[in-house]
Image (tube, rainbow, N blue to C red):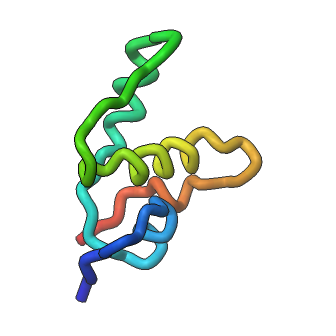
Amino acid sequence: MKAIPIGISSFEELRNNDYYFVDKTNMIQEFLERKSKVTLITRPRRFGKTLNMSMMASFFDVTKNSKLVFEIQKS
C-alpha cells in the first residue's frame, strides 16, 4: 500500500519509495516551451514549491542519470 508522504521534499525520495504525490512533471515541459529568461514561482506556502524545485533539479542535473525517477509507473 502506498503511503502519504508528510514532510518529504525530495522528488527522488517520493518516486523511489513509491509514495503518493501529485504529478507535476508537465511543468518541466511548460518551462521549456516558454523559453523565458526568468521564471518567478510565486505561490502561497504549502503548494509544493520545494518539491517542484527538487523535481526540476533531478531532471536537469547532468551529473546523474535520473531516467528511472521519471519513468511512468503502471498501477
**Above or below, comparing residue 75 to residue 9 in the picture:** below
Q: Residue at x 24, y 89 (%)?
A: 1
Q: Quadrant of residue 15?
A: bottom left
Looking at this rendering, what residue extends furthest in the front direction?
45
Number of numbered discs on residues: 0
Q: Residue at x 40, y 53 (%)?
A: 51
**Above or below, comparing residue 21 to residue 54 in the picture:** below
Q: Quadrant of the C terminus?
A: bottom left
Q: Specify whether 4 is left or right of 68.
A: left
Q: Residue at x 31, y 75 (%)?
A: 5
Q: Quadrant of residue 42?
A: top left
Q: Specify whether 34 is left or right of 60.
A: left
Q: Specify whether 59 is left or right of 17.
A: right
**Above or below, comparing residue 13 to residue 52 in the picture:** below
Looking at this rendering, what residue extends furthest in the bottom direction?
1
Spot occupied by residue 29 in the image (x, y as percentages of width and height): 39, 29
Front residue (pair 57, 15): 57
Q: Quadrant of residue 25?
A: top left
Spot occupied by residue 66 in the image (x, y as percentages of width and height): 59, 54
**Above or below, comparing residue 3 to residue 64 in the picture:** below
Front residue (pair 9, 19): 9
Q: Specify whether 65 is left or right of 22.
A: right
Spot occupied by residue 72 in the image (x, y as percentages of width and height): 36, 57
Q: Residue at x 60, y 39 (%)?
A: 60
